[in-house]
Each structure stands twice: as structure tokens, then as C-alpha cells.
Image (cartoon, coloured by chain):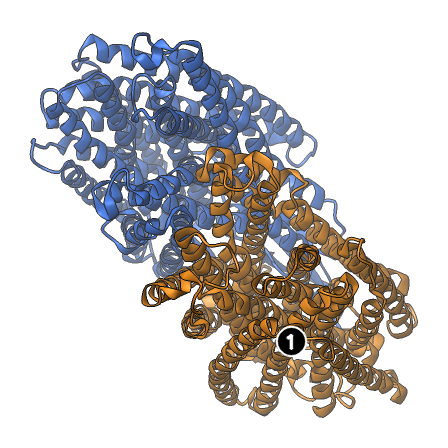
Chain colours: A blue, B orange
Amino acid sequence: MHVGPTVALYLNLQSAPINNPGLVHAGDSIWLWIALGVGVLALIAAFVLAKIVLAGDCGTEEMQNISNAIREGAEAFLSRQYRTIGILAVVLAVLVFFGYHSSARTAPFALKTVISFLVGALCSALSGFTGMYVSIRANIRTAAGARTSLNKALQTALRGGAVTGLVVVALSLLGVGALFLLFGGLENPQAVPYQLVGFGFGASLVALFAQLGGGIYTKAADVGADLVGKVEAGIPEDDPRNPAVIADLVGDNVGDCAGRGADIFESTAAENVGAMILGAALYPVFGIKGILFPLIVHAINLIASIIGVAVVKTNDVEDPMSALNRGFYVTSAIALAGFAGAVYEMLNGPGVHPIWLLFCGIIGLVTAFLFVWITQYYTESKYRPVRSIAEASLTGPATNIISGLAVGMETPALPVIVISAALLLSYYCGVQGLADIAGISAYAKGIYGTAIATMGMLSCAAYILAMDTFGPITDNAGGIIEMSNQPDSVRDKTDKLDSAGNTTKALTKGYAIGSASLAAFLLFSAYLEEIKTIVTAKVNVPGGYMPVGWSFTNINLAEIPVFVGALLGAMLTYLFSSLAIKAVGRTAQMVVKDVRDQFRENPGIMAGTSKPDYARCVHIVTGAALKEMVLPGLLAVGLPVAVGLIFRNFSASYGASAEVLTSNGMANVPSINGVPVNLAGASAVAGLLMVGTISGILLAMLMNNGGGAWDNAKKWIETGQYGGKKSDAHKAAVVGDTVGDPFKDTAGPSLHVLIKLLATITLVLAPLFL
Amino acid sequence: MHVGPTVALYLNLQSAPINNPGLVHAGDSIWLWIALGVGVLALIAAFVLAKIVLAGDCGTEEMQNISNAIREGAEAFLSRQYRTIGILAVVLAVLVFFGYHSSARTAPFALKTVISFLVGALCSALSGFTGMYVSIRANIRTAAGARTSLNKALQTALRGGAVTGLVVVALSLLGVGALFLLFGGLENPQAVPYQLVGFGFGASLVALFAQLGGGIYTKAADVGADLVGKVEAGIPEDDPRNPAVIADLVGDNVGDCAGRGADIFESTAAENVGAMILGAALYPVFGIKGILFPLIVHAINLIASIIGVAVVKTNDVEDPMSALNRGFYVTSAIALAGFAGAVYEMLNGPGVHPIWLLFCGIIGLVTAFLFVWITQYYTESKYRPVRSIAEASLTGPATNIISGLAVGMETPALPVIVISAALLLSYYCGVQGLADIAGISAYAKGIYGTAIATMGMLSCAAYILAMDTFGPITDNAGGIIEMSNQPDSVRDKTDKLDSAGNTTKALTKGYAIGSASLAAFLLFSAYLEEIKTIVTAKVNVPGGYMPVGWSFTNINLAEIPVFVGALLGAMLTYLFSSLAIKAVGRTAQMVVKDVRDQFRENPGIMAGTSKPDYARCVHIVTGAALKEMVLPGLLAVGLPVAVGLIFRNFSASYGASAEVLTSNGMANVPSINGVPVNLAGASAVAGLLMVGTISGILLAMLMNNGGGAWDNAKKWIETGQYGGKKSDAHKAAVVGDTVGDPFKDTAGPSLHVLIKLLATITLVLAPLFL
């Protein structure tokens, strides 16, 4: 029997003997060293970039005071947040350890799983920390740069963002690669990828809490500051008299920088591990090269992005977006060329048609472009959706909201069609590319095709992340300029940058949900690979019974446990969003209360004679946001575990819907390595995972795009449409914008992370559900 | 080979030979005659009730003028609507006929399918028409009755509603029963239920357009009348000077009465047919009695509901809800007793434990109660959710909306847990009840248990529907009293009734979504029974290959076509809702425009010296609503068909994920009666159906309960909380209420129907997807 896509879990986790030693060329391990080497180089490049950014001018003392206040607030939040997350991570590590230890089948892997979990969590936290460390220092230098030239400011902001992008991707590459090496991947390449699943789980756990906590913080501070500042006291946004203004600027950093950094770290980490597992399934074809391929793709990603960032240059008249796009095109072109080279070099061999596999990668890249385009269509004011919301504002806030929700509900249509087409096409190309390989099912070939598409989509992630982090840096720079009373010429420059930053933030959100969708499918496939079992039946043949076995990758929605899991998964996405939104509301109320208190206690604030106590407000939001992130976070972790553990005890009559027909057949028995297993738990969790993901993707699109559209409808009215600022239409549009805030910056992005957390937690705990 | 749960589609549609003639006792056909007899009696009872209601006093001439205007508007809408639906139905009938004719396998059933489709559509239309015919005449008699006593008014309204309830359930029973008889069900009981699927499809098609058209009409008129009347002109609700006021009252009838009547007709029709198909799968156990059981349950339902309505009596001091509840308790008790009797009489036999099957029915009833209770919790002002929305109104419309959406997103949690528990428990009871029966899989037994639970839940549907139609009748009566300047003592009575009507409307919406969820599962199971195929493998045994067959009920989410179908199904629910909401917005704009025009053209209207042209406004809304219902309706019908037809051409490499493992096995081949089939189309549609249903249920709960909560938060503030009417909090709450209107009365109820339409359309077209 060959060890191919029919390998079962037990075997995968064990040290599987290499069945085809001819496939392991000693020389192939060079690919691992190349990937690790590029990872180290990228870290050095990030360090150099950070040095260059930090060497920049820091502007006036007034600017520095503001920047310092932001920095202190952000650092205080992050250190308290990491303490909370650290405690949760250690508790979970202990639970996972004992869970694995409770069964003889999994006990040998307990330590490795916990180690990779903790390393993943640590790398994720480090990514978030680095991203924030640089961006809260790049903001003031961007602001100061704007006093010289637009190019100076643009380069500072993008390079600050690039540090995050490079560190995130490099740490993911180095973490996965180093653990693979440490766990003996070069000797035992088919089994070790399964032992890395803890890394993805650790990464997602930190990402979930980072995004939830940061998202709650940023929107509570924003909404709270607006409610009491703009609405009650009638002072403009970013006015230094508002005690919540620093908290608002801190929020941009902890929500967007730290949160998004951890999010993309988790995406690449989970994608790396998932793709390696699928590569292991194709071991008979590609050998260890198929397993190392994802790491090489990210090495290319790093090189392409460094070059892309280096070429970005502008002058004082060009639209900053054009310069950023130029860098993106350069990055994409290099990434594509590198991808093609890697496919022909690594995914090749007798009977393989690499051109089809390259097509898969191109499909991924095209999908990324289409997602970005669709996001633009739904959130930019030059297209119908935003304009329809703006027009509906004429008849008041109710019609504005109805119209925004209708737009939000419309937004999943095109992306779903694009994902569907990408999955079907890349599956087809995968089957074609490996059509001449015998002994591997068409299914395994097609699924590998979808995995290559996902890698293609993520092949310029580092540059995208740089553009994304560019957003909050320029946002902060604008705030610092606003609060420190700089001349209009400087303000014009930061306004230009801020507008480009808003665009990049929206685009990368589209990219993030697109890649989350494809990565989710990749991770399902890895999960299914992990729980693949062998169903045997005894067939009555002349002379006695003969066993016949089917390899079984089956999540059958017709089974009640799977259907109930699916219902609960979809419900989880709604409840989680509800909790996240309510958390913002409660935290914002505390901000409102503190600002009111400060205005009352110290009338000098409004008079402009004394400074408000920014730190007190920051302190309050910090405490509240950290408290509020725990419940939705625990729900996300707890529900899949509860479903798996409850259903694994269900009687077999809830399961098998396939039954032996012929009179000479006997009952079928799912088994792993000959030991009968009850699949109810694992398949209920699979139902939860898959339908939860589908529901989560759609809800996230509704909230991200709906929120973005409301925001830009307001901005469009502010350009003078329908009466411009201060008109009734504008007031209605402000309502929509406020409703959209927790949608697009708290619940939506947290759902991205939830989707991936569901995938990684089930990957880690699958053995416990059997 | 026995013909049991392993019967495949081809066989089902053919005239299957009766394998166990001992099971058909000639005497058992008596049950069909009993059911038909009760159906006819119920129609007579409905006729008598209608006579009694219509014999009532019609009040003053002014009241009659208003009532006549409502009646004319409603009848004009309905006749134009039915013309549009009729054209669509005929086109679809032709398409279905030719679709069935295109394959030799299905051609013999083309005529029967089309006949049952047309009969179903006709009965559904008739149900909607009768409901409305009586309610637009009962409204004025209720109003007139309120001038005598509360009891008179209450009885008139409830009896008017009961006519609808009885006609709907009786027509569903008679339609299904008569077709069963006509198609030779008594001779060939296992095959004929499959030939009735067209009945359910016809019913859902009419229901979809009736609910969409009516829902768009009612909310467009409501929102339009409010926007220009209350907001712009500053006149109160139901003011006779508002040209849209009659359109608003017409809307209550065409939306709530005609729409809901068709909706519940479709529920019972689809449930009857689905349960009969599952009964056919258990033919070896229960014989024809298992197939006729659902019809007998509805016969009991009719008798219990007639008695329940007869006992409702009140006086002028009691809360009308108590009287209505008394009737409900009586109905439930009789229905339960009848249900138990039917179980012991019909679902009994050697080796059967009927007590467990009765438990299934009780689980269904308890589920109904729990759903009603949960709906109350989320939509009544004495509980936390509504109060939290009211409190959030203090900080303006934005926080009101955020809070309402958060409540809406929370609402699916408890119902999902209840459905999950109901499915798991009734499955368990089904398995236990038939544990001693050999030759039937545990799966088929469990699924039958869930079907019995669904029947239990629907076993007092006629009374529930009477309570539901009670709502719009009292609402209309209140409007007539308001517009005809009656004394306060009369108004007090109609206010009391109106408030009870609002409660019953909310409760029945909870009941409707709960029964839709369970019925959807029943219909999936019927669909799976229909596409159940036999997977064969050839096994290499000494002396040659031997075929081994598995019966296959498998909707495997791990297969790309199923997953893509699932994605598209979930997307459909969002896009459909978006289209429905936008349709309301566009139609409301036309109302606004017409009212503004009328005010401008005829200044005498506002002065009170001349009457507005009510008919013109009614005419405009009618045309617009009918135009707007087409696109979402066609999307709902077209998408599953497109998915099925596209994917049926997909190569087999997209399908089979199960692969033969052992070296002596050969490839597996799904086949039906020995003819190989490609399952990609049928399973992609199954993915669409199941995940579309899950997503639809959750979205509908969000919209129904969110909308109800916003409505009642506003009403709670109007009782004097947070500053009462005219306060800023009230203004904010009005915004929420307006947002909730198209949610709870257009998109939400239309989603209920969409879910069932998906199930019935796939049941009818399944043979074409293979």
C-alpha cells in the first residue's frame, strides 16, 4: 500500500516510514535553508528600514508631546493586553497538553503541539508589538517629513509600514521553518507538518484577542470622543480640548497596526502549515519539495516586497496612490516571476504539467485583484452603492441606514461568485496538472490546485501589509499636525496622505477577506486530511468475509451532528458579532462618562486654559476594552471545543448514513489504522467550521463594505453634495457612519480572525474529537 | 431485495411493486377517506363561520366608506398580483414539463408533476384570496362590534381569522389527499408521494410572490405615508388627509393576510408531501398508514382548532390575550390527545414502541412553545433586549441602530440551540421507537422521528393562523375607528384589541420561523431520500469481480461543488434580502412623490375641505410593488436551477471523494438502478439548499426580532419612558422603528418563504440535476 492521500490521522501523527526513499534527495533540503536564509535577511532588512525611519526628524516639541502621549498610551495598552493574552495562552497550553495526554494515541505529540502553540503565540505577539513599535514612532516622523516634502512623508510612512509587513511574514516563515527543522522534518517530512498545527493555533489565538481588544478600543474611543465632543460640546474632531482625543489616536495604532499585524501573521502562518499538510499528501509526487514550496513562496514574497517598497518615490504633485500602486505592480510582477520559477523548479517531475499549476497561482493573484476591485466598487464614492446611500440621506437617518444595510447585504454576491470560480478553476487546473500521475485521487490533485491558488493570492502579502499599516501611520500624522497647529501647506500634504491611507485600508480589507476565504478552504482541506479515516465493510465472498476499505473524506450535511454543528457555527458568527458590537457600545459609554466628568471637574479645559487629563481617559478605555474582549474570545474558543467533546460521545446511530446494500455486505465501520472510531464529534466540528466560515465571510463582507460605504457616503456629502457639511443630509450620513464604525473596525475584522481561529483550533484538537 | 430506505429515485418514481402485500390492509385506506372527510367538514365550518361574521353589523356609513376603499384597493392589488403570478406559474409549468420530457427517465412523470404543480399553485392562491376576502370584510364588522362590546369585536376578529386558518389547512389537506387518490396512491402508496412534490412547489411559488409583493406593498405604503405625512406634513398616523392612508391599510391586508395565508399554506403543503415521502421510506414497517399519518394529523389540527375558536369568549374587563390564550390551550390539549391516539392507532405494530414516537410529537409541541417564548423575550418591552434599545435611544439614532442590530444578531442563539436539541432528541426517540425493527437503518428511523416532531409542531397550525390573521383585522378595525371619529370608549376597545393583535402577530412570526426550521430539515430529508443513489464498487474476488453496493445519502461539504453550492446558497439569502429591502425603498419613494404631488395639486386636502385621491396612491403602490417583486422572486427560483444545471455537467473528478482503498477494489461508481449517474449537480444543489436554509433562518431571525424589538422600544418610550413622545429619545427610536419595518415585514417573512421554496423547487427538479 502506498502512503499517499489515503494516509490516516494516526499514521500521520506517528513517525511514518518514508515509503519512497528515492524521493528524498539529500539536496532538496537546501530549499528549507534558502527559505530560512531569506527570512533572516528580511528581518535584517526590516531592522535597517526601521533604523532609517527612526533616524528621521521628529518635528517641534509640541508635536513630540502629542506623539509621546500616543506612544505611552499604546504601549500601556499593549503591555496590559499581552499580559491578559499570555495568561489565557498558558491556560490553554496546559489544557491542550493534558487533552493530548489523555489518550495513548495522541500522548506522544503533546509536547510538540504545546511547543509549537507557544512559539506561534509568541511570534504573533512579537509581530503585533513590532508593528506598533515602529508605527507609533513613524507617525511623528511622517508628520515632520510633511514639513519638508510629500515624498519624504510618503516614504517614511510606507517604510514604517514595510517594517511590519516584513517582520510579520519573516517571523511566520522562520517560525514554521525552524519548528519543521527542530521536529525532524527533513528526516520525516510527511508526519512533521501535522505536528506544526499548534503554531497556527497559537498565532490565531493571539490574533483574535489582539484584534478584538484593539478593535473594541479603537471604536469605543472614536465613538465616545465623537458623541461627547462633536455632538454635545460642539468641538471639531481631533480638537486638543477633547480628553478622549489621545485615546482615539492610540486606538488607530492598537486596532489597525497591532490588530492587523497579528491578523496577517496568522493568515500566513495558518496558510503555511495547511499548505504543508496538503503537500505531505502529495509526497509521492513532489517529495519534500512539495512540502517546502509554501515557505519558498513566502521567501519570494519577502524579496519582491523589499524591492517594491524600495522603488516607491513621488513628488509634490502626484497622487500618492499612484506611487503606492507603482510599488504594488513591481512587487506583483517580481512575485509572479518568482512563483513561476518556483513552480517549475519544485513542483515538477515525471508526468507533472507545471504550466497548469502555475495557472493555479495566477488564478490566486487574479482573485486578489478582483477582490480589491469589488471592494473599491462598493466603498468608493464614484460608484452607485455609495452614491445611493448619500442620496438616501436626503430623507433622513432611517433611509440612510436602510440603504446602507441593503448595500451591505448586496456586497457578498460578487465576491462569492469570484471565490466560487477561483475554487472551481484552480481545482480543475490542479487535476489537469497532475492528470498523468497514477495512484493519487483526482480529489487530492484538485485540492492541491486550490492550495496553490491560495499561495498565489498571498504571494505579495508583505507589500499589502505595508500599504495597510501605512494607513494608521498617516492617520496619526494627520492628527499630530492638526493638534499642533501647523501651516495649511503641511496640512494639505498630510490630508493627501491620509486620503491615500483610507484607500489602502479599504483595499487591504478586501484583500484580507478574500485571502481569508481561500485560506479557509485550504485549512478545511487540511483538517479533512487530518481526520480522513478508513471505512471498512466486510463482504461475504466464497470462503468467508473479506474486508473492503474506502478512504473517507466526508462531511455529510445529511447527518444530524454535522447539520447541528453547521447551525451552531453559523449562529456563532452572529453571536460573536453581537457581543463585539455591544462591547464597543459599553466601552464607549465609559469614555462618554469620563469626558463629561472631566469637562465638569475642570472648566478650564473647554476654555482652553488647562489641558485635559488624556492619560485618565486612555487608562479607562484600556481597562474596559481588555475586559470586554474576553467574553467573545472565549466563546469563539469554547464553542468548537464543546461541540467536539459533546458529540464525540454520541452513539454511532447518529452517524453513518451510508449503509451496505447488497445482501452479502455487512455493516460499515469507520476506523483509523484498523481501530474503530466514532466520527460524530469530528464531523460535527467540521460542519461548524465550514458553515461557520461561510456565514462569517458573508457577515464580515456585509459589515466591512457596509461600514466603508457609509463612511464614504458621509465624506462624499462633505465635498458639497446634497447640501454639504451641516446639512440635514450630512447629519443623517453621520448617523450611518457611526453605525458603520463598530461594523467595519471591530466586528468585521474580528470575524476574519474568528474564521481562521476556528480552522486552526479544530486542526489542533481534531485528535481529541475522535 | 426489500424496498425500504434503500429505494433509489428511479425506482421511486416508477410504479414500484408492493413488496409486502400483507402490509396493505384494504381497511387502511379508510384513513385517507377520514382525512378527506374532515377536510370537507372544515371547509363547511369555515363557510358557516364566514356567514356568521358577514352577518354582523357594518357600522356607520362613514365607516363603510373607509372599509370599501380598503376592500377595493386590496381586491385590485390581489387580482393584478394573481395575474402576474399566474403568467409566471404557467411559464414555469411549461418549463418543468419540457424539462421532465427531455429525459426518458422522467418523461412518464411530466404530466403528473405539472398537474400537481398547478393544483398546488391554485390552492395556494385560493387560500390567500379567501383569507383576504374575509378579513377585509371582518375588519369593519370588528370595528362595528367594538361599539357594542369587546367580546363581540374579539369574536368577530378571531372568527374572521379562523376562516383563513381553516381554509388554508383544509385546502392543503384536500389538495394533497385528492392528488394522492387520483394518482393511484391507494394501489401504489410508495411511489405516489414522490409524484406530489409539484404540489409543494406550486404552493411555494405563489407564496413567495404573494409574500414578496404584499410585503413590499405594505411597508412601502407604511414608510411612504409616514415619511411625508408624519415627518413632512406633521399630521398624525391614520389621518384621513393623508392620501396614502388607505394604501397603508390595504397593505396590512395584502401583506399580512394574503401573504401569511399563502406562507402557512405552503408550510403545511410542503410538510405533508415531505412527511409522506419519509413515510414511504418506512413502508415496510407501517404500510400505508405511515404515509397517511400526516394527513390525519392535519385532520386533528382542524377539529382541535374549530373547538378552540368556539370556546373563545371574553368580557369588557379581561385582557383579550388571556381569552385568546385560553383558546390556544384548549386547541393544544385536543391536538395532543388526538396526536397520541393517531400515533397509537397508525404508527404501531410488531416491534414498534409508539410511546417514543409520541415523545417526538411532544418535542415538536414543546419546541413551538419555546420559540414563542424566546420571541416574546426578544420583542417585548418588559425584558432586557427591548429596554437596552430604548436606553440607547438616549444618545441618538446611531446608538439606537447599533443596539438594535446587536440585539438582532444575538437573537438566533437560543432558537438555534432549541432547534438543535429538538433535532437530536427527536432523532434519538425515533431510533428508540423503532429499535426492534430490522432491515431499516438507524438513520431512516431517526429522520422519521424528526418528521414526527415537525408534525407535532404544526399540529395546531390552524388556530395559530387564526390568531395571526386576527392581527391585521384588529389593526384595520382600529384604523377605521380612528378615521371615522368614533367616541373614546370605542377606541379604547379597539386599542386593546390592536395591542393583542400586535402580540399575536409577533408570536406567530416566532412560530412560523420555528416551524420553517424544522420543516426545512424534513424537506432536506425528503430531498435526500429522492436523490439517494447506490454507489457500487467492483471487488476483486477469487473467480472475478464482484459488485458491492452502498446506499448513499451524502452531501459532502468537502466536495467543491457542494461547498460552492453552499457559498452560493448563503449568498442568495443576503442578495435576496437586499433586493427586497431596496424594493421597499424605491416603492416608498413613489408614494412620497405622489403624496407630495397631491398636496401641491390640491391645497384643499390639508385644509380638510376636499378628500385626497386615495385610489391614485393605491394604484401607484400596486403597480410598483408588483414590478419590484419580480426580480427577487426570479433570483430565488433561478439560482438553484442554474446551479443544478451547470454542475450536472461537471466532470466526475469534482465529485467522489471516497476512494477504494484496498488493492483488490476498483473505482466506485454512483449509479441509480444500475445506470451510472453524475451526482455533482444534485449535491451542489443540496449544499445550496441546506446552507441557504441555515443562513436564511438566521437572517430572518435577525430581521424579524430586530425589527420587532425596535418597534416595541419605540412603543415603550411612548408610554413615557426616557421623556416619552416628542423627546429626542423618541425621535431616535422612530428611526429604529422605520429601519425595522422592511426587515420584519418584507425581507424577514419573505425569507421564510424562500427557505421553503428552495426545498420544494429542488424536490421537483432533482431528477433533472442528475
Residue at figure coordinates x 72%, y 56% from the top left? B423
Locate residue A101 relative to residue B351 in the image: left or right. Answer: left
Q: Which of the image's four quarters has the N terminus of chain A?
A: bottom right
Residue B242, picture quadrant: bottom left
Please provide percent x and percent y for residue B679.
53, 71
Please provide percent x and percent y for residue B255.
55, 67
The amino acid sitting under disc 1 is: Arg
Q: Which of the image's four quarters has the C terminus of chain A?
A: top right
Comparing A207 with A612, the one in front is A612
Mark 1 neighbour class, 10 Å CA radius: few under 14, some 14 to 19, many 20 or more: many
Locate residue A635 relative to residue A587 in the image: left or right. Answer: right
Figure check: B634 above or below A166: below
Residue at figure coordinates x 27%, y 24% from the top left? A476
Residue A310, picture quadrant: top left
Comparing A508 with B472, the one in front is B472
Residue found farthest to the front: B609
Comparing B698 with A233, the one in front is A233
In the rendered image, is residue B609 in sight? Answer: yes
Q: Chain of mark 1?
A: B
Figure check: B576 above or below A609: below
Where is mark 1, residue-wise? B137
In the rendered image, is residue A530 in sight? Answer: no
Q: For the residue labelled by badge 1, is the local secondary structure a helix, a strand or a loop?
A: helix
Please provide percent x and percent y for residue A81.
48, 20
